Amino acid sequence: MLPRDIGLVIGHTGVGAGDRVLDAGTGTGVLAAYLGRLGAEVLTYEQDSEAAAIARENMALAEVEDTVDVRENNVLEATEEQPAGTGGVETDASDPNRRSGGPIADDSGTDNNGSEDGSAEGRETPGDDAAESGGNETFDLLTLDTADAPAAIERAPELLVPGGFCAVYSPFVESTREVVETARAAGLAVDTYETIQRELDIDERGTRPTTAGVGHTGFLAICRFE
């Protein structure tokens, strides 16, 4: 995702401080870092070990390593290893700062895990307490940037709080359609958008859209568990 896509996700879901986010397809961690900077607690899964390592470095650079937990796994396998919705960010349903729905838009020598020997000792991650308690964890937002997004969407009603959102990014129309159909079958309300942004050339001759650059980045399906 590019910032233009992330802005739409934030704007349409209302994600903010105190929200719990389950993210699949970390990549280099741009989305996770943005959400962490907003104050959300993020549990993000990446299958590629090299990408996961880069993402951890980026969380340190963004100073969000205490609120963003990067794990190397497939999100479906990770959530199936425990009771549905478990294994993420510590939650307290009585927390007054936790939304139960939120707004909807209208129509260095030290390892990044926190110790010099590369272990996670001495560093608490957002998922530690929930994993130890074994309680069923649900999330305010599920974000997917993976080829197996439809399979994850099928589990969205188990993973989301009532009123929670699922945001799915895809570069192709065909996969977006599959996402929408799966979300509807799961009982989710869905809005779909194409992300297009045009840069302007402004000079003494006049103003017009630039002839270079990429206008289209992808398609976003914003789903809500009502």
Image (cartoon, rainbow, N blue to C red):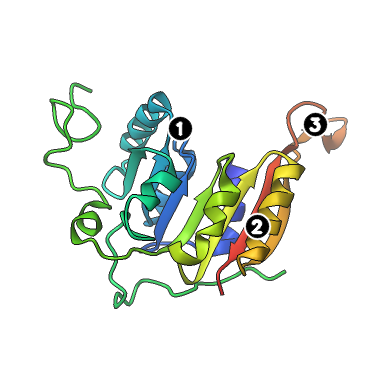
Horizontal relation, residue 132 to residue 62: left or right: left
Q: Is residue 192 above or below residue 145?
A: below
Residue drawn where x is 37% and y is 46% of the image: 78
Mark 1 Cα-neighbour bin, 10 Å: few <14, some 14–19, many ≥20? some
Point out residue 166 in the picture as x, y percentages from the top left corner. Answer: 55, 59
Residue type highlighted by circle 3: Thr
Q: Give the mark nearer the N terminus: 3 vs 1.
A: 1
The residue to which callout 1 is attached is: 28
Point out residue 89 in the picture as x, y percentages from the top left corner. Answer: 31, 57
In the displayed image of the protein, which residue is found farthest to the top?
Answer: 109
Mark 3 Cα-neighbour bin, 10 Å: few <14, some 14–19, many ≥20? few
Horizontal relation, residue 150 to residue 159: left or right: right
Task: Give the position of the C terminus as an image quadrant.
Answer: bottom right
* Residue 209 picture quarter: top right
* Picture disc at residue 210: 3
Residue type highlighted by circle 1: Thr
Residue drawn where x is 70% and y is 50% of the image: 178
Helix, strand or loop at label 2? It is helix
